[in-house]
Image: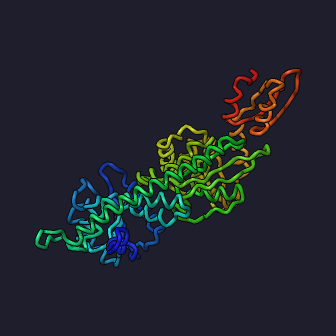
């Protein structure tokens, strides 16, 4: 018997090669909003690997319980998809399990929603055990209420002397138990991985090096920027969610010290809640960082909306108040017109302290590194310690965790000027000289 993950519906999605895209325009929304949402859906679907045969924006005064859109519009979309030779219809909305079943029964096509598109992309991009576990959990939780849809090809008629249930209904119960058990197992494994991540994070926090997170909308060029700053070789592709796993690298700042920069998963409008929860430990890197580097794609006409989306996600994570350097990326010499584009000019005027760089050509990278150095100096000011002359253990602690600027021995007091992490500063608070 097939597993719940190898159902006929799942096979239809795996076999699909082309799609028709549907975006809904809600009452009161600007006409351009639906068009922008459709363009983003096109990027997601291309990243998923489907050919786009056609697309349309549907005006929706009221949501309909059966198909989300009205019956007449549903029939029109089905006819369009079949005429275009598409295997799949993709909605830029979340469909309920019953709506998905209704669509597939009526159209005979594979019908998926934005949520499932993003899940498929994340599943294809998961490269480490942690990412695979996170995506696996999100997919299982998404599939659980849709198991009925998965077994519509089997009989559910009652039969036999005692009215026993049909093959489909029996298999549905078996699959539901299997999925529930697998969800529990994935949660246990993820908890173990998260505890290991927390241990590594605490070790970094106890060390000397300041930590920063590179955040921003998906495909803004975060990985490219980190590669350019530290000469690493993170995966870089012109696709949404090219990297899911956080990668930490050392970057040397002008005073000779180093900082740790972590590349994080990109944000996107309406990122499914279960993925936010599943990737919580990964996204929490931003919460525990000393500062953030917020990367924006200056070439995108929606850069202002991308900026606002990232700020909203950071607020939800509890990292909204972090010291932040805003960086406009992709300011390439071959595109001098980008800063004058309508999408960027208004935002640039609101962020006078922002920096302009090109990870491709190296433009502005030295200024960015210098800016990181200034921010670190502000966040970790030089402290003056007056330590007892017989407490060489405290002197060793300052040397081990801090950067020494001056050290003087005066009678029974050892005076040290140093930059130290917050943990060391708190431990030696009584010895800080005013």
Residue 342 in view: no
Identified at 88% across, 22% down, the residue is 410
Identified at 58% across, 65% down, the residue is 237
Residue 221 in view: yes
Q: Is residue 301 left or right of residue 72?
A: right
In-front residue for pair 280/304 = 280
In-front residue for pair 53/413 = 413
For residue 242, what is the image quadrant?
A: bottom right
Q: Does 66 appear above or below 19?
A: above
In-front residue for pair 133/15 = 133
Q: Does 246 appear above or below 235?
A: above
On-image quarter of the N terminus:
bottom left
For residue 173, what is the image quadrant?
A: bottom left
Residue 244 percent across, percent down from the top left: 54, 59
In the orientation shown, which residue stands out farthest toward the left? 161
Q: Does 352 appear above or below 177?
A: above
Residue 140 percent across, percent down from the top left: 39, 60
Residue 98 percent across, percent down from the top left: 25, 61
In the orientation shown, which residue stands out farthest toward the front? 161
For residue 32, what is the image quadrant?
A: bottom left
Looking at the image, how many numbered discs can be counted on the residues?
Answer: 0
């Amino acid at each position: 018997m097939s597993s719940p993950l190898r159902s006929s519906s799942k096979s239809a999605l795996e076999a699909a090669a082309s799609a028709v895209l549907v975006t809904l325009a809600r009452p009161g929304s600007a006409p351009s909003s639906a068009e922008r949402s459709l363009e983003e859906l096109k990027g997601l679907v291309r990243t998923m690997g489907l050919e786009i045969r056609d697309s349309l924006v549907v005006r929706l005064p009221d949501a309909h319980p059966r198909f989300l859109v009205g019956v007449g519009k549903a029939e029109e979309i089905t006819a369009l998809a079949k005429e275009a030779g598409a295997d799949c219809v993709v909605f830029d909305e979340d469909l309920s399990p019953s709506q998905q079943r209704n669509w597939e029964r009526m159209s005979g096509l594979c019908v998926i929603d934005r949520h499932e598109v993003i899940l498929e992309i994340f599943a294809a991009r998961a490269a480490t055990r942690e990412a695979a576990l996170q995506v696996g959990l999100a997919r299982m939780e998404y599939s659980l209420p849709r198991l009925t849809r998965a077994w519509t090809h089997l009989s559910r008629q009652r039969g036999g002397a005692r009215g026993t249930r049909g093959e489909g209904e029996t298999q549905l119960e078996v699959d539901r138990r299997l999925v529930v058990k697998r969800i529990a197992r994935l949660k246990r494994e993820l908890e173990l991985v998260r505890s290991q991540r927390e241990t590594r994070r605490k070790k970094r926090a106890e060390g000397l090096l300041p930590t920063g997170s590179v955040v921003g909308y998906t495909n803004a060029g975060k990985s490219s920027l980190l590669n350019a700053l530290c000469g690493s070789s993170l995966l870089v592709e012109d696709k949404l969610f090219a990297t899911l796993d956080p990668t930490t690298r050392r970057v040397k700042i002008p005073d000779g010290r180093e900082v740790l920069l972590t590349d994080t998963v990109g944000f996107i409008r309406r990122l499914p809640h279960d993925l936010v929860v599943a990737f919580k430990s990964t996204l929490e890197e931003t919460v525990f960082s000393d500062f953030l580097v917020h990367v924006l794609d200056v070439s995108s006409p929606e850069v202002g909306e991308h900026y606002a989306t990232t700020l909203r996600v950071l607020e939800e994570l509890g990292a909204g108040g972090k010291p932040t350097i805003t960086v406009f990326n992709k300011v390439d010499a071959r595109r001098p017109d980008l800063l004058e584009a309508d999408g960027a000019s208004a935002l640039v005027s609101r962020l006078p302290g922002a920096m302009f760089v090109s990870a491709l050509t190296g433009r502005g990278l030295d200024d960015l590194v210098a800016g990181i150095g200034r921010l670190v100096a502000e966040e970790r000011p030089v402290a003056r310690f007056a330590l007892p002359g017989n407490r060489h253990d405290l002197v060793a602690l300052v040397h081990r965790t801090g950067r020494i600027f001056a050290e003087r021995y005066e009678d029974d007091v050892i005076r040290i000027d140093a930059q130290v992490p917050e943990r060391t500063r708190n431990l030696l608070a009584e010895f800080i000289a005013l």
